[in-house]
Structures are given as C-alpha cells and as structure tokens.
Amino acid sequence: MFYRGRHHSEGTPTVNPFTTADIAAIAFFIFAWAVYAITLERTSHGRNSLNARMNIYREVWVRRILDREARIVDTHIMSSLQNGTAFFASTTLLAIGGGLTLLRSTEEAMSVLSTLPLGIRSSPALWEIKCVGLIVIFVYAFFKFSWAYRLFNYVAILLGAMPFSDKRDTPEAQSHVMRTTRLFQSAGRHFNRGQRAFLFALGYLGWFISPWVLIATTLAIVVVIWRRQFDSDAYRAMTK
C-alpha cells in the first residue's frame, strides 16, 4: 500500500516524498495547534476565555443542584450533554472510515486530481502520508470524545449521589460538590479538545491542495476559534 523509494543495486538513495514547503507547512500546523491549546488551557490569558467562564457556571450549577430536592431537570440536561458527545464520537468514526477509504483509493484519487484545474501535484507516497495524518487527527478526536462521554457518565453518577438539600452545609456535601465540579470540568475540557481536533482537521485538508494552502487554512482556523473564545457574541454575553 505505502509507496517507498527503492534502493537499486547501484545504491540509489530512497526518494523523499516531502518538499521543504511540505515540512514547513506541517510544522507550522503542529506549532499553531500546540500554541493555541497551551495558551487556552495553561496561561492566565486562557482563564478569561469562553471555556473558562463556562467552567465557573458548571460549579454554580452543581451547587444549585445541592439546594434542590427535585433534580429531574438536571438529569435531563446531563442526558443532552451525553447525547451530544456520543453524536460527535459516532461522527468521528465515520470520518475515520472516510480517511481509510481515501488511503485505500490512492490511485483513483490521483487520477481524479490530475483532471482538476487546481494544479495539485502529489506523489502516491505523499498522498498516503497525508491520509494517514488525517486519520490520526480523527483518531485523537475519537479518543477525546469517547473519554468525555465516559466522564459525563461519571458526573451523572455523582449527581445521583448528591447529598440531600438538608445536608448542603455539611463538609461532606461541600466536598462532593467540588469533586463533581472538577470531574464536570474535566469532561468539558476533553470534549473541547475533541472539537478542536475536528476544526484543525478542516484546516489540515488544505495540505491536500498544497503546503501553502495548509498554512492559510491553519491560520484561518486559528483566527476563527480564537474569536469564538475571546471576541464572539457568546463571549460578550458571558462578560456582561
């Protein structure tokens, strides 16, 4: 399946499918993803993001659950979060299947691309490397969504074990609130990472056209998701 340069008897070196532009573009893609994730999750600037503000309301929600006797509405909300996460996990499996189909159809894909007026040039080896990279991104997203789904299940169990409202001022109840909140925030963090992988996968598709398009699409994705976190209508609604 995978194309490899061959050593001839005269000792001809293996052909490298990557150009300098390809290496620079994929390095920029990885760098942009890593810097964005670290800035959002590990820096003081990230603590002012939309995600961070929603974490505050996760704690508020859990504390208000402690004050309520009837918690049916809360269980319905938790079910909707679980269902949404399950949907993304299932969609990711479909995306992985699509990537494997591309990988197995290299010759057909190269034939189709050669007829398009886009000037796309790629060796079979480089095409397959690109497909493998796309599959790896979706596999990462699947693990994040599936783990987030499991964590939401754990949160639902902790909600079911929430002390009654007449015990809300006890140390046990307060410890349970913080334990549930931390697990809830962890579930949201892994879900957000899965969605981030989805969005960067869209940027990665630019590499199938050219390395320069990959750089442009990566920049576009970073700008879009950065604005959503710090300059969107949702962000402004949470800051007023």
Image (tube, helix red, strand yellow):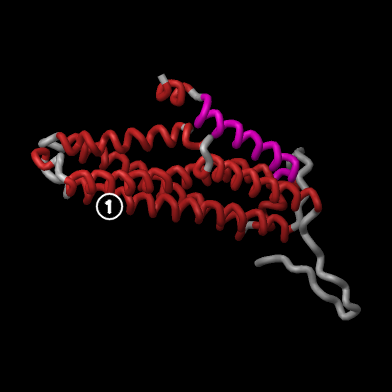
Q: Is residue 212 magenta?
A: yes
Residue at the (75%, 49%) spot, across then down:
24
Front residue (pair 235, 56) = 56
Percent position of residue 146, x then y: 39, 53
Nearest the eye: 60 or 187:
60
Q: Is residue 238 visible?
A: yes
- What amino acid is found at the position of numbered circle 1 in the picture? Tyr
Classed neighbour count for the residue bearing mark 1: other residues with Cα under 10 Å, few (<14), some (14–19), many (≥20): some
The quarter in which the C terminus is drawn is top left
Give the farthest residue toward the bottom. 9
Q: Which residue is mark 1?
A: 154
Kind of element beneath mark 1: helix
Which residue shows up at 70% across the image and 37% down it? 216
Left or right of residue 132, residue 171 in this image? left
Q: Position of residue 106 (x, y in %)?
A: 66, 57
Whether residue 93 appears in this view of the structure is: no
Q: Nearer the viewer, residue 185 or 12?
A: 185
**20 above or below 240?**
below
* Figure quadrant of residue 14: bottom right
Expressed as whole percent of the image width and height from the top left, the position of residue 38 reads: 55, 45
What main secondary structure does the magenta stretch of the protein show?
helix
Magenta part of the chain: 209-231
Query: Who is closer to the viewer here, 226 or 94?
Result: 226
Horizontal relation, residue 5 to residue 229: left or right: right
Position of residue 238 relative to residue 31, above or below, is above
Count every numbered label the image shows and give the total: 1
What is the quadrant of residue 211 in the picture? top right
- Residue 182 picture location, percent across and down: 33, 47
Task: Report the quarter where the N terminus lies.
Answer: bottom right
Quarter of the figure with residue 234: top left
